[in-house]
């Protein structure tokens, strides 16, 4: 059998067995170790990694022009150029890329819809806040710009607001913002989009189990189920984002503070 025929046979075997992608990665790697030399094993391993990546539909791209998405967003279209020009795009470091990809991997169960809204993740030094007037500021850690399908992370994304470790905080910020992208106006269970998040069945279910009223303005806490953080008390979407952050990076804390939120997210991610 020629090398080409052998590789084709291996490729067909991968394709036919790819219903369970994680099992395929393991089985293929072990099987080709028996078949081929070290160089070929490396090539097959790349194919397996490709199959693993394909289990995420339309994986969000890490881009370098974050300022453009802020400036073009309807949220800030009326802000003066003097403010917009204070925002600088930045490039992700290798460490940041690795940490973002770790979070994306955790979100894999919710990234199977080809029409999911999270298309781009970008980096800037600052953000813009509208409080009567537009201000370029360094307090905002991250922001989901729905009309741009872009998630923005700033220099403050690793500031120790939730976690003392800066690396864990950066990943927590990413997890928080991705939650906004994938669950506010989108239901990843049905691949459905909603103009009003209050009409989103996922948000409606979360509001009910977490103690928010139907209007999303009043939160009722109990001794056994409390808001995951103080910031979570802002509104249901921030509540869900904070709960998701803890579920992914401090699950024991979330389970202790709010068993209902924990069980909701456990079911969602599994």
Image (cartoon, grey):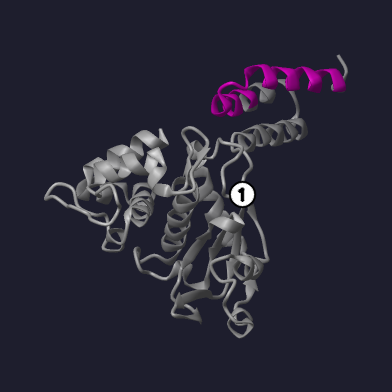
Residue 190 coordinates in the image, percent (x, y): 49, 32
Report the front residue among 74 and 182.
Answer: 74
Which element carries disc 1, helix, strand or loop? Answer: loop
Q: Quadrant of the N terminus?
A: top right
Residue 219 coordinates in the image, percent (x, y): 22, 54
The residue at 28%/37% (across/down) is 263
Question: On the picture, is 267 further left or further right than 117?
Answer: left
The residue at 61%/58% (across/down) is 148
Residue 83 coordinates in the image, percent (x, y): 58, 82
Q: Residue most toward the bottom?
A: 82
The residue at 77%/35% (across/down) is 39
Q: Quadrant of the C terminus?
A: top left
- Residue 19: within the magenta? yes
State which region is magenta. Answer: 4-28
The answer to whether 28 is drawn above or below residue 63 in the figure is above
Report the front residue among 74 and 102.
Answer: 74
The answer to whether 268 is drawn above or below residue 133 in the figure is above
The residue at 42%/56% (across/down) is 176
Name which quarter of the figure residue 168 lies in.
bottom left
Name which quarter of the figure residue 10 lies in.
top right
Residue 75 coordinates in the image, percent (x, y): 53, 67
Magenta: main secondary structure: helix
Circle 1 Cα neighbour tier, 10 Å, few/some/many (<14 / 14–19 / ≥20): some
Name which quarter of the figure residue 2 lies in.
top right
Residue for badge 1: 60
Question: On the picture, is 61 further left or further right than 125?
Answer: right
């Amino acid at each position: 059998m020629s090398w080409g025929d052998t590789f084709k046979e291996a490729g067909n075997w991968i394709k036919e067995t790819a219903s369970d992608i994680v099992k395929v990665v393991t089985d293929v790697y072990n099987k080709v170790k028996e078949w081929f030399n070290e160089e070929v094993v490396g090539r097959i391993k790349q194919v397996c990694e490709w199959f693993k990546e394909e289990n995420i539909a339309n994986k969000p791209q890490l881009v370098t022009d974050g300022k453009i998405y802020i400036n073009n967003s309807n949220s800030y279209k009326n802000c003066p150029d003097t403010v917009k020009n204070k925002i600088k795009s930045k490039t992700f470091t290798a460490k940041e890329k690795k940490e973002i990809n770790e979070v994306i991997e955790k979100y894999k169960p919710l990234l199977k819809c080809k029409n999911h809204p999270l298309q781009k993740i970008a980096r800037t030094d600052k953000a813009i806040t509208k409080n009567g007037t537009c201000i370029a500021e360094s307090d905002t850690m991250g922001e989901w710009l729905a009309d741009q399908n872009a998630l923005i992370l700033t220099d403050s994304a690793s500031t120790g607001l939730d976690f003392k470790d800066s690396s864990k905080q950066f990943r927590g910020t990413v997890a928080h913002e991705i939650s906004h992208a994938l669950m506010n106006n989108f239901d990843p269970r049905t691949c459905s989009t909603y103009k009003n998040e209050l009409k989103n069945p996922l948000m409606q279910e979360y509001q009910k189990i977490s103690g928010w009223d139907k209007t999303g303005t009043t939160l009722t806490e109990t001794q056994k189920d409390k808001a995951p953080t103080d910031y979570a008390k802002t509104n249901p979407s921030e509540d869900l984002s904070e709960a998701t952050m803890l579920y992914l990076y401090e699950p024991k804390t979330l389970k202790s503070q709010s068993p209902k939120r924990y069980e909701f997210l456990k079911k969602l991610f599994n």
